[in-house]
Image: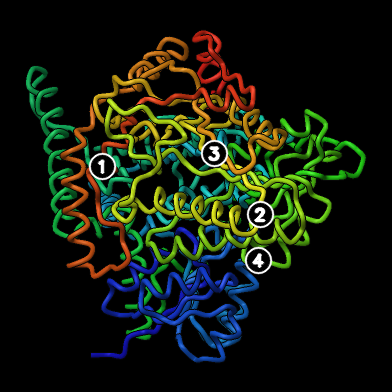
Amino acid sequence: MSKRTRVGIIGAGYISDWHADAIQATDQAELTAVVDNNLAAAQEFAAQRGIAAFGSVQELLSAGAVDAVHVLTPPEYHRAVSEECIAGGLHVLVEKPVAPSASDVEAMVSAAEGAGVQFAAGHNFLALPSYQRLKALKESGKLGRVSTAEINWCFPLGPLRSGPYGIWMMRETRNLLLELGPHLYAFMQDLFGEIEILHLQISNEIALPGGGTRPQGWRILARAGGVDVTLNLALVETYDDRSVVLRGSSAMARLDYAKDSLVVAGVNTSDLVLNPLRDALGQSVGYLREGVVNAARQLTSLNQKSPYGLSFRGICDEVYGALGAARPVDARFSGASAIKVMRAIEDTLALLPKPVVHAKPTGTPNPTALVIGGTGFIGRALTRRLAENGTHVRVLSRGKTGPFDDIADKVETVAVSLRDAEGLEAAMQGITHVYHLAKSEDKTWAAALENDVAVTERIAQAALNAGVKRLIYTGTIASYDLSDPQVTITEATGFGEDMESRNIYARSKAECEARLMKMHRDKGLPVTIARPGIVVGAGGPLQHWGIGRWHGAGAVKIWGDGRNTLPFVLIDDVADGLILMAEHDAALGESFNLIGEPMLSARGYFDAIHQKLGARIKVSSGPLGLLYGADAVKFLLKTKVLRRGGLSKPSLRDWKSRAHYSPFDNSKPKEILGWAPEDQRKSFIKAAISDAGLLGF
């Protein structure tokens, strides 16, 4: 057996898990290292995979730990990182978009050729088994001569409506096409050849906080290899249609690349009576076959072979198979293909109308409030309400920009790591009130202790050292046991003793609260704790997982039967409550459940969406006992079969708590703070639904 290629991952973000799983699944390679400039994130990822962690590419190169790397950093760093690795003699696979410009891609490919290493573009959907069958079908002539094609990416893009707005994809209009377009253009280039862009139409502009707009609809007309091609991107809350449709003189083929299914509709020689029946039956059999094959594949692989997962496995098999055989990588993933794709995208972007430049207000902020997590849903509303009230704000963010250009004279954004104690303390100089809204997404308790609990303690200590007057921390009502409809929840209810059996998020937030209150008692930390309910309103998502499990924009399985009243609260009411906690001395050392007046059940909420927006979302009940049982089986498979450690053990109490069976008494914040949440149903529905922009159009 030939030696396997040692592979490292550069960038430990969301997409890294998909690449890691694919690398570990191929016989041609082994995952040996991960690099991230956030060393703690790299170490957490490495611990889960049993690999080495590094804080820089140079450290990785010096260690000689890998033969190849997957570059998964934000796109603006792809070229620099790739060229550093290429200069170090490493083969590279670069996530799409390979780079922000064709000239960058050309330079990367040239560098790889000069160094004698392999370069591969991460056009993963071209590796799907169903796509390869589509291409073979087209080349066999069984479709006849293909005259037209339609390539669709109709899939909701949540950040357009609810953020985060600081991520690379959202910073400029062009970045939307650079991020999503490579999938569509790679299909077009691989199927038909050289691309000529004829027309671009954008639509459904959505206004962003802070100024500027982004189009949610893109329609691109092109011609490639004698075929007229239409590319459609619809990023509103829409039915998921990610497909490639080829129309030939003999048949039509439809590839659903999100589901890895291919169905062909062809002509038949039956008479006029039987022809429609045979046509419909033929397509039905095709859909049935594809559905059965995919379901069986995912079941037997413990969901390791989902269509998306298969696409990454396919590209890894090809790339490392080529390396092992000392042959060039397939043209689908070659540097030459990447250059052609990026040139076509640039030709399209050249047709964009010139953006309107909005002048920022003049003036330098003099902040007295610090919002940590200020670019999130609650943080944006809080920051704007503070500024509206005359308080200048400093926002801590991962980046140096935030969605506040229109109030830049009152809000400044600074980039400080939450692991940097000195940086946090420096950011609190001149600050009287600190709002800690940040949260981490952790899969293990050890990670939560590092990324959430330790971070919260670090923020609290910095606040003590800086002498701030008040630290307002946002916990969660999920820390309560909400499984009993006979128990009314108040701030005195408590979370219970057995937090170890709770989900990691609820447990982590409860632990943060406990440690903050201990610092209040032992060190005099001036802390107040807020626990918002299910927050709704403008800037929030349609697909809110506090209500149920979503299956696209049009279907949701609600937690339980959905008939009990849910603890909804309007986003503006939450912002007002947080500000009141900072202003009232009586709030010191106290906690407050920010729950609105009883208004709607889950079913009532979706009925109101239908009435106000004309969208009937399919609602089904989620049997919590069965969901718990399925979760328990998954837990056993993950821990015993896949050997994953540190996972939270499923809890029936947790699943019942998701339904929010227990009612709340919200009298404490009203009596102590003078908080006045919306109490009129009509006004609540207007703010939560009618004016919330839930569908994006």
State the mark number for residue 169.
none
Marks counted in the figure total: 4
Query: Would residue 155 appear left or right of 356 to someone viewing this image?
Result: left
The disc, 2 or 4, on the residue closer to the chain's N-terminal end is 4
Q: Nearer the viewer, residue 631 or 183?
A: 631
Q: Is residue 197 visible?
A: no
Res 402 → quadrant = top right
Tag 2: residue type?
Gly
Give the Cα distance between marks 1 and 3. Answer: 23 Å
Residue where numbered disc 3 is placed? 591
Measured Cα–Cα span from mark 1 to mark 2:
35 Å
The answer to whether the residue labelled 4 contacts the one labelled 3, judged by CB atoms less than 8 Å apart, is: no
In the picture provided, is 157 more to the left or to the right than 146? right
Q: Nearer the viewer, mark 4 or mark 3?
A: 3
Where does label 4 land, which residue? Answer: 104
Residue type at mark 3: give it: Ser
Residue 197 picture location, percent across and down = 58, 44
For label 1, count other residues whose C-alpha is less than 10 Å away and answer few (under 14), some (14-19) or many (20+). some
> What residue did someone put label 1 on?
653
Q: Nearer the viewer, mark 2 or mark 4?
A: 2
**Badge 2 is on which residue?**
524
Residue placed at 24% from the left, 46% from the top? Answer: 261
Kindly report which numbered mark, 1 or 4, lies closer to the viewer in this rendering.
1
Q: Residue 68: x and y, percent?
A: 46, 81
